[in-house]
Image (tube, helix red, strand yellow):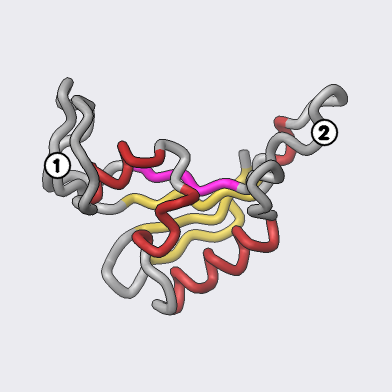
């Protein structure tokens, strides 16, 4: 993985644009691509304490050709996060860990024992 760019969102959240292309194989040539790594402050503590309220945790937002979310979409959303046009909540449908990340972020989702 290579970090292409690091920046801080207008709300103070650290984000970075990552290139994961080197992890593709001949068998799966389009599996990996661009990813946004975001490090917001958790609002909730996980069941095992690996993620704690008040501490930064990682949210991954990656391209997914099966859902139609392309590398271009990832790049556009990274720029939108950087300049304040979008928030992490706006991209929650693309969170790698789905509702789990949404819950840690403090969004209104049902707690499922994470």
Can you tell which mark lies on residue 5?
Answer: none
Q: Residue furthest front?
A: 110
Magenta span covers which residues? Answer: 58-62
Q: Residue at x 31, y 61 (%)?
A: 13
Pick the quarter of the image with the N terminus.
top right
Q: Residue furthest right?
A: 26
Position of 38 relative to 27 (above/below): below
Secondary structure type for disc 2: loop
* Callout 2 crowding tier (Cα within 10 Å): few <14, some 14–19, many ≥20: few
Q: Residue at x 32, y 74 (%)?
A: 10
Viewer-closest of 83 and 4: 83
**Magenta stretch: dominant secondary structure:** strand
User: Which residue position holds label 1?
Assistant: 44
Q: Is residue 78 magenta?
A: no
User: Which residue position holds label 2?
Assistant: 29
**Residue 24: image location, x then y, percent:** 76, 31
């Amino acid at each position: 993985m290579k970090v292409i760019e690091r920046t801080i969102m207008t709300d103070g959240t650290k984000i970075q644009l990552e290139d994961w292309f080197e992890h593709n194989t001949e068998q799966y040539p389009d599996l990996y691509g661009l990813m946004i790594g975001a490090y917001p402050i958790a609002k909730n503590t996980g069941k095992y304490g690996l993620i704690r309220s008040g501490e930064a945790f990682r949210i991954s937002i990656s391209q997914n050709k099966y859902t139609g979310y392309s590398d271009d979409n990832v790049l556009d959303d990274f720029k939108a996060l950087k300049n304040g046009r979008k928030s992490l909540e706006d991209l929650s449908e693309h969170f790698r860990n789905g509702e789990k990340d949404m819950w840690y972020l403090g969004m209104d989702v049902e707690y499922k024992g994470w």
